[in-house]
Image (cartoon, grey):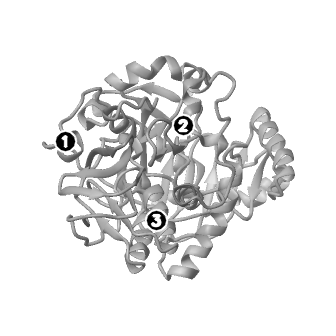
Amino acid sequence: MSPPLHHLNTSSKPPASADVVVIGGGIIGVFTAYYLAKRGVSVALVEKGRIGAEQSSRNWGWCRQQNRDARELPMASKSLDLWERFAAESGEDTGFHRCGLLYLSNDEAELSRWSNWRDFAKTADVATHVLGSREAAERGRATGRAWKGGVFSPSDGTADPGKAAPAVAAALIKLGGSVNQNCAARGIETEGGRVSGVITEAGVIRTRTAVLAGGAWASSFCRQLGIRFPQASIRQSILSVSPVEHRLPDALFTSGVSVTRRNDGRYALAISGRARVDVTPQFMRFAPQFVPMFAKRWRNLLPGGLEGIRGGHETLGRWRLDAPTPMERVRILDPKPCLSTIRETHRRAVELLPELREARITHAWAGFVDSTPDGVPGIGEVPGLPGFILAAGFSGHGFGIGPGAGHLVADLATGAKPIVDPIPYRPERFSDSAWGKVADF
């Protein structure tokens, strides 16, 4: 069952030309297009399926600075301000609010890591409160348990994954941008060695700048252009339950299970890091580059099945530009959730928060989290193809930093001063080894 998602009605026929074409209607793509349109740039956004229908509506919805990798923290901080500003400027509702994020633990090593991150965060002017056992028990009183400690990040918050990307796309349309659903981009045309057009199933859009925000599809799309972008997807399963009478924490993390309250009162439940690895041709090709990542996180990964192959997003094949592509055969990646994970997640959640016993399961779904070898996204113009900007590989962190990432891409596309230092995200770094560079969180 797919997660709840607000639907927009748009045309599938793109314009004949645009200053910038954005490929992909997830949270990164829509924010990129929005910030371009705000600058008066003519922008066309093309999405093979529905706006926000893949990982952008299948995540926790956390918008956090807490426990961010140092390379992503500046973007996370900017994004929180941009989430708020977007609502004020556009009048659209993403469900964002700064509810604060609560982390609880009885593991001394985990508490030590959080405390060390707090010390680092001070250098970046980010406030996070380390909780002693008494404070942790008070903030976590809904669990009815004693806790050794925890952290609380008061300025962090959540947004609604079912609302956010469609809300930004609606704001983009108000600004005069073109949003085209059920319109797959098949490839890129070039003239004189640089981008000159984007080939879609509905025709060519003339442009000198194309942004690929294709999520789990990005690597296979790059392969058509002779660009090597190492990417691997893992399949994570989540469920939601109906509202309960007594309000529980808005956003609670524990090593056993995490809980996030949605605006309509439902709660999303997930186990952090618990994922299935579906072996695909692309996975096998890039597996050597992901050894550092798997060496660091193997305890949370389990063997998968055939869902990755069924999706078609990790093919090594080449496709024709004048015939339907894998993206048109599978408009929306909607993999089957792991039922054993769903059952275990629900069991742990009810054990942690007894109030959830009265709630019924409303939805259960899975999504493909696209990762890079170091767990940090690739953002920037691809060497060797002027006018082609990559914005993919967000490694499960993209929703929260979506506004900052979109703003950065718009900066790069227009030559404006970047909102954050773009160097840590440059795509050419993937030619180097990821040993010692894998993100801690």
Residue at 65% over, 57% down: 418
The C terminus lies in quadrant: top right
Mark closest to the chain's N terminus, 2 or 1: 1
Front-most of 53 and 254?
53
Disc number for residue 371: none
Q: Nearer the viewer, residue 205 or 167?
A: 205
Q: Which residue is mark 3?
A: 266
Residue under pointer 1: 321
In the rendered structure, find residue 427 and report the number of the disc placed on it: 2
Given the image, on which type of amino acid does mark 2 rest?
A: Pro
Q: Nearer the viewer, mark 3 or mark 2?
A: 2
Above or below 398: residue 384: above
Q: Secondary structure at mark 1?
A: loop
Where is residue 219 shown, x and y percent of the image? 39, 35
Amino acid type at image mark 3: Arg
User: For the residue labelled by badge 2, is the local secondary structure a helix, a strand or a loop?
Assistant: helix
Task: Give neighbour class at mark 3: few <14, some 14-19, many 20+ (Cα, 10 Å).
Answer: some
